[in-house]
Image (cartoon, rainbow, N blue to C red):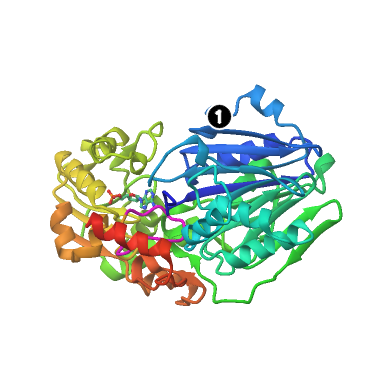
């Protein structure tokens, strides 16, 4: 059985650059927020694929000697984070395999909804899997395909998988990127515009990676598109029937970096507008607005602007601590909030405080923060959340816990308010979440807020297991 169904990740691809490994490294460094469990880079020197994968953070995994070993002008890279199941090097990507046409490497962001089903079929037909990750299914499908070229094999493989994927593949002479027809997860194409690296290309999960390596954004890889870059230039295929797009709205709410242009819009500006709308919907009299750093900052700025209540940093973050959410155990997570955030008495004493965060998952962070604010002298604490209540898990690649652990799956806003011990609590409305897009909800997936899952899975073994898992965890 596949051990996991959440896969927050980042992917990078570099083609035609004399320092491909270095560029992939820097890109992964900029994309560290998308996954901190393990990372890896595979390069091609034209004769073979060279790989380095390691548990932990990019800056720790790639020292000078490692980068030096990763020779070649093309590379792919991956950051992985998953809470479920084994945290193990064998699940670190990119995966590399040899098949009849040579070596191929793959890096995946997203989550397949029929991964287990396909895996069982492949295993029955004799495939031997090295990892417990669904991504390996794609590699086996490519290896067993009868397609005459690697592109055709990829098309055949992807025609069998369902769910969310933003993928990069590396062969000896090609870099290939693919995005699922729904376009759940982001993937962009960039190029190096100047000097000796002119003509080199890059794929990245987010544009913040392009900024660091001074590549220019060309366009998003489109939903359902397969882009191949090789000795014959750049080629685009759209082999699958079109489906309504389902870009992840939660990337805007929380997951992506604010300085990225995501699905065509700057994330910071979207978040600020969510905060403004939140203030319009649920303003309250108070002395100051304070963000939960860093995730609540842009929304708090918008909220303060709209409500004309001063913005103050009542909570200061220690930047040398990872996200509290990363810690796998409840006890550590609770402790983690205190390590990460400190409330400023001189700012908060005697004040009516509006505290803004992007989302509530289990509710434990908010509860700790509100206690902290009160301990520092806040007279009233009004919690404002710049998204609707998170009621359902994500099956398409965002690491949300099981339904049973999501506080809003079984509790009303008033019950949650009591749990987190706020004076008032308000979420952003679902309609309000789309204000920035002129109310146009078309093209987005908001299943974690609405329960409208765009890829149906009831008939599939994998998701049946997920539901069972959910039920057991209630
Ligand atoms: P909780 O204590 O479980 O309610 O955690 C809520 C906090 O987790 C919020 O401050 C969010 O910014 C953050 N958060 C929301 N979704 C995720 C996610 N998928 N991964 C990591 N952190 C998250």
Res. 112 visible in picture: no
By secondary structure, the bulk of the magenta-drawn segment is best described as: loop
Please name whichever residue, 474 or 191, is drawn nearer the observer in this view of the structure: 474
Please name whichever residue, 321 or 160, is drawn nearer the observer in this view of the structure: 160
Please check the rendered image and state whether residue 399 is part of the magenta-colored stretch, yes or no: yes
Res. 143 visible in picture: yes
Quadrant position of residue 343:
top left
| Residue 185 x/y as whole percent | 53, 59
Q: Which residue is mark 1?
A: 61
Residue under the image location 74 percent in, 63 percent down: 152
Please name whichever residue, 448 or 381, is drawn nearer the observer in this view of the structure: 448
In the figure, is residue 338 to the left or right of 187?
Answer: left
| Residue 203 x/y as whole percent | 67, 51
Vertical order, 107 against 468 (above or below):
above
Quadrant position of residue 390:
bottom left
| Residue 56 x/y as whole percent | 48, 33
Q: The residue tagged with tag 1: helix, strand or loop?
A: helix
Please name whichever residue, 70 or 130, is drawn nearer the observer in this view of the structure: 130
Residue under the image location 50 percent in, 48 percent down: 133
Residue under the image location 29 percent in, 32 percent down: 339
Q: Residue furthest top?
A: 65
In the figure, is residue 11 to the left or right of 425?
Answer: right
In the image, the segment drawn in magenta is 390-401
In the figure, is residue 411 to the left or right of 406?
Answer: left
Viewport quadrant of the C terminus: bottom left
């Amino acid at each position: 059985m596949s051990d996991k169904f959440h896969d927050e990740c980042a992917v990078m691809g570099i083609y035609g650059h004399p320092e491909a490994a270095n560029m992939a490294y820097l890109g992964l460094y900029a994309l560290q927020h998308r996954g901190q469990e393990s990372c890896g880079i595979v390069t091609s020197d034209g004769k073979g694929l060279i790989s380095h994968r390691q548990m932990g953070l990019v800056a720790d995994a790639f020292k000078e000697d490692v980068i030096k070993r990763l020779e070649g002008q093309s590379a792919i890279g991956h950051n992985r984070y998953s809470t479920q199941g084994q945290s193990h090097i064998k699940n670190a990507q990119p995966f590399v395999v040899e098949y009849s046409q040579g070596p191929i490497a793959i890096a995946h962001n997203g989550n397949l909804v029929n991964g287990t089903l396909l895996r069982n079929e492949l295993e029955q037909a004799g495939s031997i899997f090295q990892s417990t990750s669904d991504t390996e299914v794609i590699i086996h499908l490519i290896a067993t395909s009868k397609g005459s070229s690697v592109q055709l094999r990829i098309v055949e493989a992807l025609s069998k998988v369902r769910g969310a994927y933003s993928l990069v593949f590396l062969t000896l002479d090609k870099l290939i990127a693919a995005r699922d027809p729904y376009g759940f997860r982001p993937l962009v194409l960039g190029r190096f515009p100047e000097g000796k690296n002119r003509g080199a290309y890059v794929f990245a999960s987010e544009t913040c990676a392009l900024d660091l390596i001074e590549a220019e954004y060309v366009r998003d890889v489109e939903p359902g598109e397969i882009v191949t870059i090789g000795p014959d230039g750049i080629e685009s295929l759209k082999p699958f029937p079109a489906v309504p797009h389902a870009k992840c709205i939660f990337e805007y709410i929380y997951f992506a970096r604010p300085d990225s242009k995501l699905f065509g819009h700057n994330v910071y500006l979207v978040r600020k507008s969510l905060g403004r709308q939140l203030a319009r919907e649920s303003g309250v009299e108070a002395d100051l607005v304070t963000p939960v750093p860093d995730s609540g900052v842009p929304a708090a700025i918008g909220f303060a602007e709209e409500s004309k209540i001063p913005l103050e940093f009542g909570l200061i973050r220690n930047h040398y601590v990872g996200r509290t959410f990363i810690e796998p155990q409840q006890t550590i997570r609770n402790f983690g909030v205190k390590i990460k955030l400190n409330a400023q008495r001189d700012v908060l004493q005697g004040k009516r405080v509006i505290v803004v965060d992007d989302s509530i998952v289990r509710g434990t962070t908010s509860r700790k923060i509100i206690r902290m604010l009160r301990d520092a002298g806040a007279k009233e604490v009004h919690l404002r959340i710049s998204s609707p209540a998170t009621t359902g898990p994500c099956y398409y690649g965002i690491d949300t816990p099981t339904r049973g652990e999501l506080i809003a799956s079984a509790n009303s806003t008033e019950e949650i308010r009591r749990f987190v011990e706020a004076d008032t609590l308000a979420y952003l409305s679902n309609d309000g979440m789309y204000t920035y897009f002129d109310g146009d909800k078309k093209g987005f997936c908001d299943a974690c807020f609405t329960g409208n899952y765009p890829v149906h899975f009831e008939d599939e073994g994998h998701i049946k297991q997920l539901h069972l898992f959910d039920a057991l965890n209630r």
